[in-house]
Image (cartoon, grey):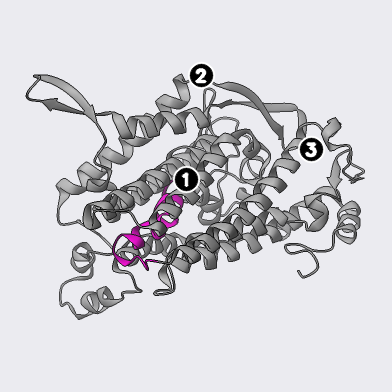
Amino acid sequence: MKKEAAKFEYEFGGPVGTTVNYFLLPVLVLLLSHWSKAGSVDLSFIRDFTDSDLPFWDRFLQSPVLCPSCQNASILYQCTAIVVGWFLFQVVLERFLPCNLVEGAPVHGDPNNRLVYRINGHLAFWVTLFVSQFGYPYWHEPSQSIQFQTFPLEDWLYKHVEELALVTILLTTALSVYFYVDSFIGSKILAHGGNSGIPVYDFFMGRELNPRIGNFDWKEFCELRPGLIAWVLLDLASLREQYNNLGYVTGSMMLINIFQGIYVWDALYQERAILTTMDITTDGFGYMLVFGDLAWVPFTYSLQARYLVNHDPHLSYAALAAILALHCVGYAIFRGANGQKDAFRRNPNDPKLTHLNFLQTKRGTKLLTSGWWGMARKINYTGDWIMGLTWCLVCGFGSIVPYFYAIYFAILLFHRSLRDDQMCQAKYGDDWQTYKKLVPYKFIPGIV
């Protein structure tokens, strides 16, 4: 047993790093929710926190940044009802909307063990948008009947975004506890990276690979449904708030909603492509993914739209056009590369792909060495980052806060590329070294 433990390769700084993340990540979400409205890195709450003579817990509960509305239980109860109701609404759509049943990748490489997934996220996306625009019931006094109108998104998704973030953080922590405990019950398929035997580490990484209730797959559902679609609604709430304040919507606000709306739509339209990603095939479903999918993504990725409500730079048409052009370049790279990879994985003998060169590996699979994937091994990451940069550029240069995403995402993609490289080295052996010689660049052809 000691020999096996010595061989275990930790990620994210091991048990110490993951413990730090338990505190750092939730605080970052709350800070960014506050800073995006403040328009700057406002640290005044620290002075207010340290200057008080109250006991630590009382100071924490009174902090409008670290524990928003904790003195007003009614607000938090309502936010909890909103978050839980939203999650259940997405579950209902996943369960009852028409779907395609699609087999996933072999579990742990076993071709005789493939899970079946219900693919209907794209339809759920459009149904959700329709309901948000036309599904809010109210009593119409003149006609003495129930009528429907647009949900007042800004009343809660903008004005109480900090409270919604806090509640979501608490609920994702509780859900992570459930998955960790449940992973010890019965015979479960465990993720290699979340089975170190050290609870504080395994809780973060996730012990069970694909937790399910019947054929409801928790991980695939959370990866694409509640968090991503909520991100779009949070953006729309900011748009509505800006319109209420100014009487019009600015060019930057329009672009951020279009850019990020298309990004989410693309992910849901290409839902089956996620079934071959590391998140689904390799990572366990623990705090890292539960918190990331349901709290981190919607509340941090929507910060540019919140920033623009009161801090719009009012960019010129020329600047907006340049940003739009750069975004189109990023999207072309991102979608072209991912589409080519997904098509090749599904059917490498497709006549449309016969012009592509590949390396035949000893394990029987093929690695593309031409087309998009002959340019760089992670060319899709480059396109993804360029799109993310344009989300920041629409906010101008008045604050570092909107650029958090570009900085964080560069670090994330670099770290993920290292994880991918390690996984592929273990998977393909000497063939991976041969592949890296054929495709020497990682992100930008001819540069890096």
Prevailing secondary structure of the magenta residues: helix
Q: CA distance from mark 2 to mark 1?
A: 23 Å
Q: CA distance from mark 1 to mark 3?
A: 27 Å
The vertical placement of 403 against 358, above or below, is below
Q: Residue at x 31, y 59 (%)?
A: 309
Q: Amino acid at mark 1?
A: Gly
Question: In x, y percent, where is residue 177?
Answer: 43, 44
User: Quick check: is 305 in the magenta stretch?
Assistant: yes
Question: In x, y percent, where is residue 279?
Answer: 61, 45
**Mark 2, other Cα within 10 Å: few <14 / some 14–19 / many ≥20:** few
Judge left or right: residue 155 versus residue 24. left
Q: Residue at x 75, y 42 (%)?
A: 340
Q: Which residue is mark 3?
A: 344
Q: CA distance from mark 3 to mark 2?
A: 27 Å
Q: Residue at x 22, y 52 (%)?
A: 244
Q: Which residues are magenta?
A: 293-314
Can see residue 141?
yes
Count of numbered badges drawn on the protein: 3
Residue situated in front as seen by the camera: 433 or 366: 366
| Quarter that holds the C terminus | bottom right
**Mark 3, other Cα within 10 Å: few <14 / some 14–19 / many ≥20:** some
Judge left or right: residue 16 versus residue 330. left
Q: Which badge, 1 or 3, comes first in the chain's sequence? A: 1
Residue situated in front as seen by the camera: 100 or 116: 100
Judge left or right: residue 401 versus residue 145. right
Q: Amino acid at mark 2?
A: Pro
Q: Which residue is mark 1?
A: 261
Task: Name the front one of labels 2 and 1.
Answer: 1
Q: Which badge, 2 or 1, comes first in the chain's sequence? A: 2
Q: Amino acid at mark 3?
A: Phe
Q: Which residue is mark 2?
A: 98
